[in-house]
Image (spheres, rainbow, N blue to C red):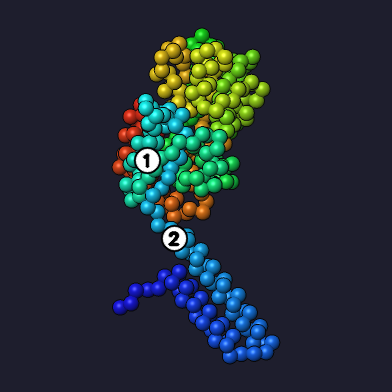
Amino acid sequence: MREPICLEQGLGLLAEALVGRWTDLRNTQKGSGSVKRLQLLGIAALGLLAATGGAFAQAKKWETVKIATEGAYAPWNFTGPGGKLEGFEIDLIAELCPRMKVKCEIVAQDWDGIIPALSAGKYDAIMAGMQITDKRLETINFSRPYARTPGAFLVPKDSPLAKVPNDKVFDIGADAAAAQKAADEIKPLLKGKVVGVQGSTTLATMMERLFQGVEIREYKTTEQHDLDLAAERVDAVAAATTTLDTTLSKPGFENFVIAGPGFTGGFMGRGVAAGLRKADQDLKVMFDEAIASALADGTISRLSQKWFKRDLAAK
């Protein structure tokens, strides 16, 4: 019994037949009518050949996937002693790649250029604590989310904001009015204060949209705003609670505390996921299936507990 012919094979055979017919007519026919038929057949053959090539290109066999991370966003990803990349996402990559049956290469890339470099083909995916947002979806695609984390504030223990407990999380997507009301209630405590935040992040968007009128100072990395917080050059920083947990574990931050309600959802994002080019739909399927498997068997929960001391798996 013969194997069924796939779409690409069928297009290829039809294109070959058209090319053959075009050659026969060219050698045997003359006159304006024949010329028109030749032209039409030629156009059809070229179109099918192009379609065949496109179909084959889309069916790329992935053997190696190059993944970019920032390397400066602990504990998601950071550069450890000796320049080695470490963190939750580095461990997660080591789990996902065997499930996708590919070899993975990890490269460090500054946050500012991480999406443009993906679009330019410098690498194939981004795993850098990146939230799925509508704005980013205009440019790139995402895998299914593998983690979720709210944003909050880190302040000195003697700050007025320190008295506001970090025991509530407001979902901007589910109830924007409630989230704005919560932000308005603590906004007076930030009057005359400077809040540090990493630029081009959902936390920067949170400050701009929920805390209008509060002075913010943008930084290239969270590590930079942490240093300025410790040096009292800013009065607070806004970051993901997981990042703030890591900051608190460092020497010199004993007199700081996570404060205020947490904010998530809506323009803050639909979860942390792998960023991908829109054209690479097959790679998205591979990531989605691998992430689903790692969520189902508890791998992501285990890695989350290891690095964040809490379960942030996107179940």
Looking at the picture, does residue 303 appear above or below residue 28? above
Spatial distance from mark 2 to mark 1, Cα to Cα?
23 Å
Question: For the point 37% across and 27% down, which residue is it?
Answer: 82
Q: Position of residue 210 (x, y in %)?
A: 61, 28
Q: Amino acid at mark 1?
A: Ile
Look at the numbered disc 2 and give the secondary structure of its residue: loop
Residue 95 appears in the rendering: yes
Q: Is residue 131 left or right of residue 291?
A: right
Residue 100 image point, x, y percent: 35, 50
Mark nearer the N terminus (2 vs 1): 2
Q: Quadrant of residue 90?
A: top left
Tell me the residue at 45%/36% (across/down): 108
Find residue 69 and report its image quarter. Answer: top left
Identify the residue under disc 2.
59
Furthest-top residue in this view: 158
Q: Secondary structure at mark 1?
A: helix
- Dot 1: within a 10 Å radius of its alpha carbon, few (fewer than 14), some, or many (20 or more) residues? some
What's the residue at 42%, 29% (across, down)?
A: 78
Looking at the picture, which amino acid does disc 2 mark? Ala
Residue 233: image x %, image y %? 57, 14
Q: Residue furthest right?
A: 32
Q: Quadrant of the C terminus?
A: top left
Q: Residue furthest front?
A: 27
Front residue of 10/173: it is 10
Between 171 and 307, the residue placed more toward the observer is 307
Q: How many marks?
A: 2
Residue 180 seen in the current view: no
Using the image, tell me which numbered label, if any, was put on residue 93.
1
Q: Residues within 10 Å of mark 2 (few under 14, many from 20)?
A: few
Vertical comparison of 33 with 272: above or below: below
